[in-house]
Amino acid sequence: MSGHSKWSSIKHKKGAADAKRGKLFTKIVKEIIVSAREGGGDADSNPRLRLAVSNAKSANMPNANIERAIKRGTGEIEGANYEQLVYEGYGQKGIAIFIETLTDNKLRTVAEIRHTLSKYGGSLAESGAVAWMFVLKGQIEIAKNEIEEDEMMMTALEAGAEDVEVEDDIFLIYTSYSDLHQVVKNLEESGYNIQNAELTRIPKNTINADDVADKLLNLLDKIEDLDDVQKVYANFEISDDVMERITAD
């Protein structure tokens, strides 16, 4: 919605990824391990692993770390056995929260998530309570640089994308979840530098959270800070003037 910031773009404006580089590395390593375990250690024949490795390189992760994570996934090096689990909950104003995790101890993970939600104004929900409120999509990030919006839109659609949005200095390109890897390949072959590509969950509808913005963003930050949490999604939006106040603080 014009004039509003959604959770998908708020994290860019807050600079959360840069501020938490160590956390980012941990999340990427886990994703590489699970991808290699499930689809093998050859990135050429494992699209999920190829995407994880690409994101690791975009985050400037050393090659040695990437190779070690792949070997942990294939069993060449011993390491934790991570399990993919999702949790659902509510934030302030009943805003839906969907949490993706990779964990080697699900009792610890659910306890930490329940505690964090309760402490910062949310609550844990039953499985299936909010999942239906989100649609699984592919999301690709490309820096705007000197690229014209019309050019990016045309190229992305020809590459198989569904839509393109502009958020500050990046293009957000959306695909069906099954077409993500192919669209990434097509855009790279067209000469575009992919900053990040991942599966994401887009809310079907959003709730305005201006009146609870500070508390809600704090809650989501605390959840994302948990070691086992990979991604957090929420169905809300904040008006630009409120967002400007928060980012200026």
Image (cartoon, rainbow, N blue to C red):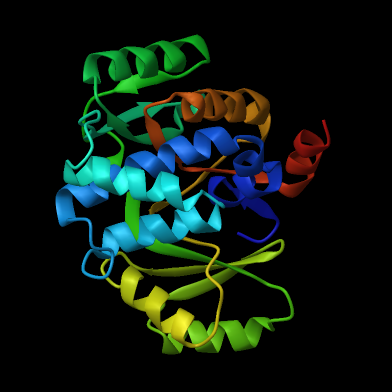
Position in image of residue 179 (x %, y %): 30, 73
Q: Quadrant of residue 136?
A: bottom left
Residue situated in front as seen by the camera: 229 or 238: 229
Position in image of residue 35 (x %, y %): 25, 50
Residue, x 55% and y 45% (percent of image)?
7
Residue situated in front as seen by the camera: 69 or 87: 69
Residue situated in front as seen by the camera: 242 or 174: 174
Quarter of the C terminus within the rendering: top right
Image check: 173 left or right of 109? Answer: right
Residue situated in front as seen by the camera: 102 or 219: 102
Residue, x 55% and y 79% (percent of image)?
192
Residue, x 25% and y 30% (percent of image)?
79
Q: Quadrant of residue 118?
A: top left
Residue 54 seen: yes
Number of callouts: 0
13 relative to 120, above or below: below
Image check: 102 left or right of 19? Answer: left
205 relative to 170, above or below: above
Position in image of residue 163 (x %, y %): 47, 74
Residue, x 46% and y 33% (percent of image)?
95
Quarter of the N terminus within the rendering: bottom right
74 relative to 117, above or below: below
Residue 198 seen: no
Position in image of residue 139 (x %, y %): 44, 62
